[in-house]
Image (cartoon, rainbow, N blue to C red):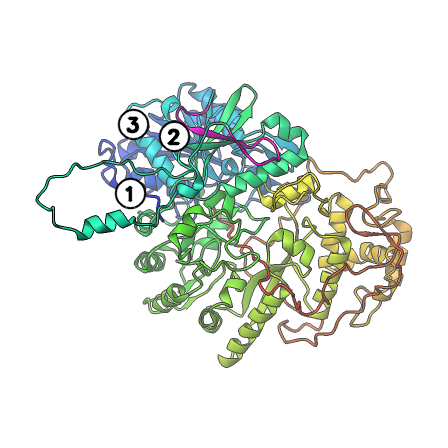
Amino acid sequence: MQQTAKDLFSYPKFKNRVSKPAPFLPMTRAEMDQLGWDSCDVIVVTGDAYVDHPSFGMAIIGRTLEAQGFRVGIISQPEWEDAEAFKQLGRPNLFFGVTSGNMDSMINRYTSDLKLRHDDAYTAGDIGGKRPDRAVLVYTQRCKQAYKDVPVVIGGIEASLRRIAHYDYWSDKVRGSVLPDSKADMLIYGNAERPLIQVAHRLASGESIKDIKDVRGTSVMLKEPLPTWKGIDSRTLDTPGKIEPIISPYTEIDETCSKQDKEEIIDNSDADVAKPIVMQAPKQMPWFETYIRLPDLETVKKDKMLYAHTSRVFHLETNPISSRALIQKHGSREVWLNPPAAPLAEGEMDGIFDLEYARVPHPSYGDQKIPAYDMIKTSINIMRGCFGGCSFCSITEHEGRVIQSRSEDSIVKEMEAIRDKVPGFTGVISDLGGPTANMYKLGCMSEKAEATCRRLSCIFPTICKHMDTDHTPTINLYRRARKVPGIKKILIASGVRYDLAIEDPRYVKELVQHHVGGYLKIAPEHTEKSPLDIMMKPGMGTYDKFKEMFDRFSAEAGKKQYLIPYFISAHPGTNDNDMLTLALWLKQYKFKLDQVQNFYPSPLANATAVYYTELNSLHKVRETDEKVVVPKGARQRRLHKALLRYHDPANWPIIREFLLKTGNRHLIGRGPKQLVPPESLAEKQAQRSNAKPHLGKGGANSKNKPNTGNKGVKQQRAQPGTKQFTNALTKHTGLAPQEGVGINEHGNKAGNKPNRKKPAVDNNSSANGSKNANGSVKGGGFNKPSGSRPSGANKSANKGDQGQQAKRSNKR
């Protein structure tokens, strides 16, 4: 990395107020008294239960500030109806730090179908409702009510994903930045250690929060742009225009050496003659002190095309070396977004993870279980960031594309700490991973390319020629880790980026033969090109190559092991035909998915912009752009999800109705090439007493209201605050495979290589069937999309294929 920044651990300790780490950061006055504290310098307010473990954001932030000499207290899941709970530790000397927790509070509370969850993996006892909706807003307001003059700094995933105007799925409208909405003094986005330490020391030195405007990785409210900064106007779809002249990008690097300079170096004849020294200021890079003006809040609320344009500009400005600042008018004031903070160096990553964590929940929770802790208590985060760029994933918006890795020594040290400290440790490390399992120490091999790169993904649609794909560091880490005394088994539970893995078969062999516990989760997400292109994911040809390696190396080791694929339904770019083809692929290869999830439009994700605008903002937005197919509405989303679980009897009525209306009656039956069985006598009898849901005239995309069999009951979006309960089943939990996952219809484990024959799909039943605006067939047969492949192996014409998701539930 070319950008340099002050080392996190080079700051002088603040007043040497903390002589040694606290057993736990205090949550009560009594705990403060035991530590001999009369006050806290910083109080962290969080929506999660306090677990002193480096997978939990409040612990990382709290211990990092403690290592700088600050006294840090924790207010965990306070009662938010009034300000009293926010006074329990007294007035902080420097600031409140507010976060919703490891998850966005809205995603934590509502399913992708907007139903209320009754559980919360980050709460003791797995009880839902212990944090408010839009927790950052509520907590900040209560902090201000408790101590009006104390600065409030907001951060974490919820603040990061709302740092500019964004589409809000839960209210189905564009909302402004959470910074002015909450009336916080500063927003820190991404992993917060570097900017937070800088801000804390500046406040400790007596500087006012109102004067701290230029810290990278922060956002503040201004009346006008910072002085001396140059501007680029990007408020229209035209080529961005200059507000003030900036240096040409073609002058950024001078790689030539003049002939005169060479001659002066060689000619020493006048060595004794004194010559004047000419001092020339180094050339500034074209992005230095440059900002981009985005369309204002009111404009993006009204104009979807300019919203898509704003999303594209925002995602192009994520490079921590060359990103420009962003500015967006909100009413009479400006949201100023400084460029991203410099990624942490290896030594800094080690320093953060080597701090004195208790590695268990706070004692106040007693014997209550915290599911998120139980899931990760024996796992180790070896890196941060992801350069995959999956459009539905929020990791890039939060952690960035640059991989930040720990050293082998630090990772082994944490393994030993787990062995020695975690109660009931059995010798099994549940994961060595991160957002992605196999990006450890990978990165760009060209400093020049890395400095100026604006790609959304380093491996989509093809792997960049500058990207290092040598997995030797990961292989060496696995081999060393297996030798740690007391460690019996190391599993890899983080998602494997298999399009990257097949570039180094040595890694696949090491993984398969030593670190798979019978099942390995991977995420093709879909089989069809249209949704895969919007997802920025590889085609199934890449999956086939990885599966061949997986099966071969498993056989060589004498092991029977199985791939567990995950898929997303109702993703932008997916029509009903795509989902039917995917369902037939699942049936052909005898997969019965247990946990499935409809696409969840999280704030600021690329796919969310496509969902809202129905425009492809992954490319330059133009007035002539065609609409993207986007599954919307409860009926169509329910159908897409049902097709993924074709084997569930509860889904057979809606699937049968869809097949009949699209001319695919031949797919109803009990044969191996038929999707669902005919209606049984029991179903007919049940239907007489209680009518089943009806798709309405015109199929899944009909605008007619469904017939639920209950008068007066309307199918509508469940709004936040309504009591509509469901189990929280998502494919991103990181939980072990559930019962039934990867089990075929005969009760045997999936994974045997199937006979790849094209499923029987009637492509001629309605040559004249008309299409709805979203591309699905209306009133006609199932017409195979032009250019689509057979639903068996994807013999993609694009050999590069396209990208996989890096996922980890415990990202900050």
Q: How far, Cα to Cα, is label 3 from label 2?
A: 17 Å
Could you say which disc has been placed on residue 72 in the image?
none
Foreground tag (3 vs 1): 1
In the image, 629 versus 91, the foreground residue is 629
Badge 1 marks a residue whose secondary structure is loop
Disc 3 vs disc 1: Cβ atoms closer than 8 Å? no
Is 358 on the left-hand or right-hand side of 305? left
Q: How far, Cα to Cα, is label 1 from label 2?
A: 18 Å
| Magenta-highlighted residues | 225-242
Badge 2 marks a residue whose secondary structure is loop
**Residue pointed to by mark 3:** 204
Residue 282 vs 244, above or below: the answer is below
Point out the tag, 3 or 2, that comes first from the N-terminus: 3
Point out the tag, 1 or 2, that comes first from the N-terminus: 1
Disc 3 vs disc 2: Cβ atoms closer than 8 Å? no
**Residue pointed to by mark 1:** 7
Instruction: Name the residue: 22% across, 50% down.
Output: 263
Where residue 693 appears, as percent x and y from the top left, is 83, 48
**Residue 405 position by quadrant:** bottom left
| Membership of 533 in magenta stretch | no
Residue 742 vs 621, above or below: the answer is below
Give the amino acid at mark 1. Asp
Give the amino acid at mark 3. Ala
**Residue pointed to by mark 2:** 214
The answer to whether residue 50 is seen in the rendering is no
Q: Residues within 10 Å of mark 2 (few under 14, many from 20)?
A: some
Is 260 on the left-hand or right-hand side of 508? left
Instruction: Name the residue: 38% across, 30% down.
Output: 214
